[in-house]
């Protein structure tokens, strides 16, 4: 397993593009992205659990209900959510792209991100699709930029691995900066691979992976309406198709995690207004479910986020978050430490305060990446969650997001 260049274009048979078509007023911002596979690919996806959902999710669910797709198109600047003609616009987008590519409209995954409740005009998309298609190439970076909204950095990664004696590749791009919280697919993430795997096993791998990756991020406690993680596997690497559990399936899952985990960290560190990446590592849990609840509860806490922004080693806020998380823990056994490249300081043992240097703790918490270490001392299970600090800029960004 090694990291390689190429993003969603690293795998054989995949090309991508990103253009400005006119949805966003700023002409320097790309607002339409495309990922295309030379061959029809196995497809799988997971979606937001919000009851209010964008029209593109409805259309995508229907399109890949047979387990296959060949292209992904995504616009930024408008969520196409809460619009009477939303489904019609999403379907039109699929048909227009399919006609230009010479593929079936049912083989298109469609996504949108941006402001909710504003009508999405099909005109710029219709006029932009020919250029979008003609621009296809090894342009993962352009596609990554085309799906960004309040993101400040492009998010992409690719890895190379081996299955059945054949070299396989997998790459992904993501967008996500605000309205991010556990128990959903979270954000927009598109993954491609040339490994051969059946639709059923691909869905199984993705559904299992998000439990420990995208569902373990919280930036602001808001679950968005358009979140989707989709993956295409076109089989062009030539490995024996993965159709059941076994060594090859486990290798595939490790490769998937090698793509999704870094994307999680990128998303969390790029939270709206964020200055620090928070990573909560829980150990000593009675079971994995308990560990997940605790880790997510801590990174989701507004007060913990605020304390980390201020480099305040206020472990009481961490302990408080554990206490109301709903996890069945023994609060008299909890140990808490803060760590960074500047060192580690233990601030709580067996649920009570321990003496520590406030000066040393502040030095640790002033770093860009903070690790919150929690030992529940009740078993051998663990989990990791990611978040960011809460700053003044978060309010500024969201106070004027629509206007």
Image (cartoon, rainbow, N blue to C red):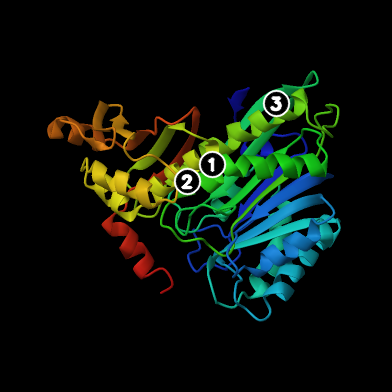
Residue 265: mark: none
Measure how far apart labels 1 and 2 are at the Cα level. 6 Å
Residue 289: mark: 1
> What SS does tag 3 mark?
helix
Measure how far apart labels 3 and 2 are at the Cα level. 27 Å
Q: Verify CB contact (< 8 Å) between mark 1 and mark 2.
A: yes
Residue 312 falls in which quadrant of the image?
top left
**Quadrant where the image shows the C terminus:** bottom left
Q: Residues within 10 Å of mark 1 (few under 14, many from 20)?
A: some
Residue at 82%, 50% in the rendered image: 67
The front one of 67 and 302 is 302
Give the mark nearer the N terminus: 3 vs 2.
Answer: 3
- Residue 346 locus on image (x, y percent): 25, 29
Give the mark nearer the N terminus: 1 vs 3.
Answer: 3
Q: Which residue is mark 3?
A: 251
Residue at 27%, 58% in the rendered image: 392
Is 346 above or below relative to 389? Answer: above
In the shown orientation, is residue 128 left or right of residue 388?
A: right
Q: Residues within 10 Å of mark 2 (few under 14, many from 20)?
A: many
Q: Which residue is mark 2?
A: 293
> What SS does tag 2 mark?
helix
Is 85 above or below relative to 92? Answer: below
- Residue 199 locus on image (x, y percent): 81, 44
**Quadrant where the image shows the N terminus:** top right
Measure how far apart labels 1 and 3 are at the Cα level. 24 Å
The residue positioned farthest toward the top in the image shown: 165
The front one of 98 and 277 is 277
- Residue 276 locus on image (x, y percent): 33, 43
The front one of 149 and 391 is 391
In the shown orientation, is residue 274 left or right of residue 101?
A: left
């Amino acid at each position: 397993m090694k990291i390689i260049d190429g993003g969603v274009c690293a795998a054989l048979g995949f090309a991508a593009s990103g253009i400005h078509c006119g949805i966003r007023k700023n002409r320097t911002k790309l607002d339409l992205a495309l990922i295309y596979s030379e061959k029809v690919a196995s497809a799988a996806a997971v979606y937001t659990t919000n009851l209010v959902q964008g029209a593109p999710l409805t259309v995508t669910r229907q399109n890949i209900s047979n387990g296959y797709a060949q292209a992904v198109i995504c616009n930024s600047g408008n969520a196409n959510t809460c619009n009477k003609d939303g489904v019609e616009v999403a379907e039109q987008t699929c048909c227009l792209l399919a006609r230009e590519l010479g593929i079936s409209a049912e083989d298109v995954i469609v996504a949108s991100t941006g402001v909710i409740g504003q009508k999405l005009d099909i005109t710029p998309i219709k006029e932009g699709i020919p250029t979008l298609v003609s621009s296809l190439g090894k342009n993962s970076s352009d596609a990554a930029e085309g799906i960004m909204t309040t993101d400040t950095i492009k998010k992409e990664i690719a890895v190379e691995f081996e299955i059945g004696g054949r070299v396989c590749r997998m790459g992904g791009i993501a967008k996500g900066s605000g309205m991010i919280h556990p128990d959903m697919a979270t954000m927009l993430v598109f993954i491609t691979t040339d490994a051969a795997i059946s639709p059923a096993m691909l869905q199984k791998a993705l559904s299992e992976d998000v439990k420990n990756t995208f569902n373990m991020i919280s930036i602001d406690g808001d679950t968005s309406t358009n979140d989707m993680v989709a993956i295409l596997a076109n089989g062009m690497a030539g490995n024996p198709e993965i159709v059941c559990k076994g060594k090859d399936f486990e290798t595939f899952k490790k490769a998937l995690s090698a793509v999704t985990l870094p994307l999680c960290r990128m998303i969390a560190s790029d939270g709206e207004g964020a200055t620090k990446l928070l990573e909560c590592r829980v150990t000593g849990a009675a079971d994995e479910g308990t560990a997940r609840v605790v880790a997510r509860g801590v990174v989701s806490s507004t007060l913990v986020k605020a304390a980390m922004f201020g480099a305040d080693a206020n472990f009481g806020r961490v302990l408080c978050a554990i206490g109301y998380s709903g996890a069945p823990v023994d609060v008299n056994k909890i140990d808490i430490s803060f760590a960074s490249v500047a060192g580690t300081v233990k601030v709580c043992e067996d649920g009570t305060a321990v003496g520590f240097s406030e000066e040393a703790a502040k030095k640790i918490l002033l770093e860009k990446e903070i690790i919150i270490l929690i030992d529940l001392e009740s078993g051998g299970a663990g989990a990791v969650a990611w978040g960011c600090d809460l700053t003044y800029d978060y309010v500024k960004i969201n106070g004027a997001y629509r206007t």
